[in-house]
Amino acid sequence: MILLHTSDWHLGRSFHGTGLLEAQEEVLDALVATVTERGVDAVLLAGDVYDRALPPADAVRLLDRTLTRLHAAGAQVVLTSGNHDSAVRLGFGGGLLAAAGVHVRADAAELDRPVLLTEPGVDGGAGQTVAVYGIPYLEPRHQGPAWGVEPHHTAVLTEAVRRVHADLAARRAETPEPVAAVVLAHLFAAGGHGSESERDIGEGEHVEPDAPPEMLVGTLGQVPVSVFDGLDYAALGHLHGRQRLAEHVRYSGSPLPYSFSEAGHRKGGWLVHVTGGAVTDVEAVDWDAGRRLAVLSGPIEDLLESPEFAWAEQCWVQVTVTDDERPERALERLKTRFPSVLVFRHEPAGGRRARERTYAQVLRQAPSDHALAVGFVDHVRQRPASGAEQDLLRDALEAARAGEVRA
């Protein structure tokens, strides 16, 4: 049996003001092609299906088309809600969808009710069952009191997995054929590497002074990988980089980059092979979709002239200019070579200029109104006013004074 682990589609997201729906449709085309070509039995989507609780209509239509195509390709789908999703909206119609092989787990009360994927034995041999448990994103401040546990991610996830183990033990006791246990969960696991595009899910948590050590791993929002001990595979969502935390605990990452910090990522998912009731192999699958990202840095003349940067001309670009002074019309000039500059920064190679002062210092130290105006331009623009600009400021001040005298 082959399972495809994916997550964090964030349908409806934009990238620095640029819509991504076309790129998202392209990458989901590649995902459906993988399902068809590799004979995938089930797609596991571990949360953040949408980018926000009220997704735009185009994003909803894209999800509808994709689920329909996955069903036509012969794959079942198990999806859970993430911290960006509205669990209620995502779960609407779940009972009807299940009849078509699309199983939504957006309610904590259903996390110990697995989707059972069965495969008959060959030539009279024993078959196998994969029990897929979907743990939706659990808000600790709500779920902790509801379950009578501490309102922290670790405590809540520990309780969720305990309930999974209880159900799994009962099923294994009643079923003669092997049962593999797969869990979907949306969280920040300790040891995972984040990126700039993930929302902090640990903000606002409070830990009591006598909390156990596992509560204090990394940051408050992180959950130790040991929570998933005893399971055959944990398909995690939330972090946007594909990564392996343990042989059986992995993030698929997002199928597209959603920040320039992901420029070096290989985007895709994991193909999880289950044989004889056990995970026997986990294989990376890559998808190329959307425009490439480029993170460039250097003096502006090098950026404009060097053939070293030619590859980035058709990319979405984050560029840092390292000249000591902020170049005149820097962004306008850079866009003549890199039309899709989305982020522009000026960071002098030697650090911030030694002569740079706070604006409060400019106010205190300016000997005249003209010096104050020139200092303001220098402070805001990070480049001294030219002679012509200084003359213009002087003329403007003199005109203002003349107007006051006439008044």
Image: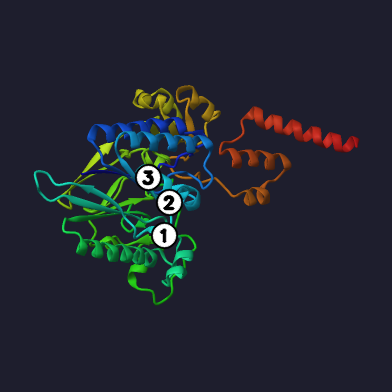
Mark 1 vs mark 3, CA separation in Å: 21 Å
Of the two numbered discs 1 and 3 in the rendering, the one whose residue sits closer to the viewer: 3
Q: Mark 3 vs mark 2: which is more N-terminal?
A: 2
Q: Which residue is mark 3?
A: 99
Q: Earlier in the sequence, mark 1 or mark 3?
A: 3
Instruction: Specify whether residue 48 is in view.
Output: no
Q: Amino acid at mark 1?
A: Ala
**Residue at point 43% right, 53% down?**
106
Q: Which residue is mark 1?
A: 108
Residue at 48 percent of width and 64 percent of height: 142
C-alpha distance separating marks 1 and 2: 12 Å
Give the mark nearest the N terminus, 1 or 2.
Answer: 2
For mark 2, does the 10 Å Cα neighbourhood hold few (<14), some (14 to 19), or many (20 or more) residues? Answer: many
Alpha carbon separation for disc pair 3 and 2 = 23 Å
List the single residue furthest toward the bottom: 210
Residue 358 spot, x, y in % from top left: 59, 50
- For label 3, the SS is helix
Q: Is residue 136 visible?
A: yes
The residue beneath circle 2 is: 82
